[in-house]
Amino acid sequence: MGLHNLIGKLKKWIKILEEKAKLLPNIVLYYIRIARFMPRVELVQKHNFSARRLYIRGNNGKDLPVPCGERCLYDGIKKRRKNTPIAEASKSLFREEKGANLESCKRHLLFTVPRVVAVSPQMRLIEDNPSFISLREILTERCDKKHVESDAPIALYYERLASVQSRGCQVTHQVLKDILREVQLTLVPEVLLKEWAQYTYQDPSDYWTFRKQLSIQLALSGFAEFTLHLTRLGPEMLQIAQDSGRLTISYSRFEVDDSKGELDANRPVPFRLTPNIAEFVTPVGVNGVMSAAIVSAARCLAEPHFSVQSILRAVLRDEMIAWHKKKQDETHSLPLSNPPTDMDSELLITLVNGAVTAITTRLQNLAQYEGGETKVTTLIAAATSPDNLCRMDPAWHPWL
């Protein structure tokens, strides 16, 4: 009897709190206004571009760093914005606390997409974080401490290839594996990323939190790279926020075959999970946190959400039109050639539907979970296999 009275009182209190919560002002009614532009300008140099970083102070007292550059310097941003609607739709679905979305909501699966504002046809403002650091910059810092050039691993790779070919021998698969292993033993050890994180986050709680957040973000980046057929994520494309562990991908776009116009699915590894990343995340994190995050994201998006397919069709339509225009420009750049023609509507529909089908098929395969075995386990094994990593381009830094 006493338990029933307690439950009744709790229900009454919860109802009172809910009524009071409705009277509170909604957060969407508040917006931050620009108070002033701070007298501080920094020069930012990142991969493939440089820009000026402005600081804007809002009426909440916080300073927002915003790089400002010409449009020609932000071609990668334009390509990345094509994937922004997909990421935003995924974020809204990940937040829904129902069905398969509940698992993604529990794990806080959210893509990190910087906001971009066009202030003029030639000028762009992009949301920035001064604590961003790329994997390539982490490698450069270590090479500077060791008094070695940051391109030394690539130089060593081609030196070994040249020495093998100079002897008249064929470059076999075993030779590539030996070169990869030599680079790891001499220049880029498997603990490079782990040592950097331990030096940066000396407090155990900070280190654990950073590793957990970055593991989830790496899982989402690998999930997007595999399912959406994005370009291979190089170390300079992965921007890590040191203050939060969030990961931003720069200059990513759909990998479209230049001759057929179809999404290119032929690559040695499905996504970036190099020995350095696997060592930092640990085997438990790879087979636990990352695997569960990929399955949760796939199950969330594999449900019949027609909004995802609609956004995919709209984005891929622009991508196919851009591919056709590029092909026409290359064909008709020769003298005495006919003027370029518009893309046939039937061909456009066929290519877009084929691309959407390829993406949804991969989503459905990743979402299947039967008997403890998933497609993700096979993908992780392929991504971490030295037999596949040694076949990657050395500019991709398979050792990092």
Image (cartoon, rainbow, N blue to C red):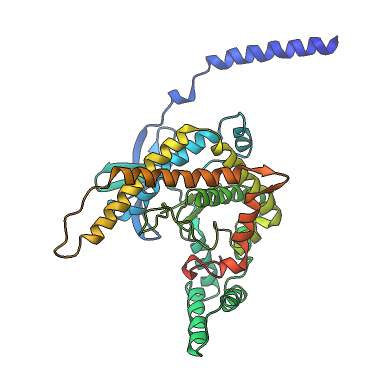
Image location of residue 308, percent across then percent down: 47, 36
Image location of residue 351, percent across then percent down: 38, 47
Residue placed furthest toward the left: 336
For the point 55% across and 15% down, which residue is it? 22
Whether residue 79 is visible to the viewer of this picture, yes or no, is yes
Image location of residue 78, percent across then percent down: 34, 48
Whether residue 38 is visible to the viewer of this picture, yes or no, is no
Left or right of 388 in this view: 136 = left
Residue placed furthest toward the bottom: 167
**Which picture quadrant has residue 336?**
bottom left
**Which picture quadrant has residue 36?**
top left
For the point 47% across and 32% down, which residue is it? 306
Seen from the viewer's position, the closer of residues 92 and 335 is 335
Seen from the viewer's position, the closer of residues 143 and 115 is 115
Residue placed furthest toward the right: 1
For the point 52% across and 76% down, which residue is it? 147
The C terminus, quarter of image: bottom right
Seen from the viewer's position, the closer of residues 23 and 227 is 227
The N terminus, quarter of image: top right
Tally of marks = 0
In the image, is residue 163 above or below residue 18? below
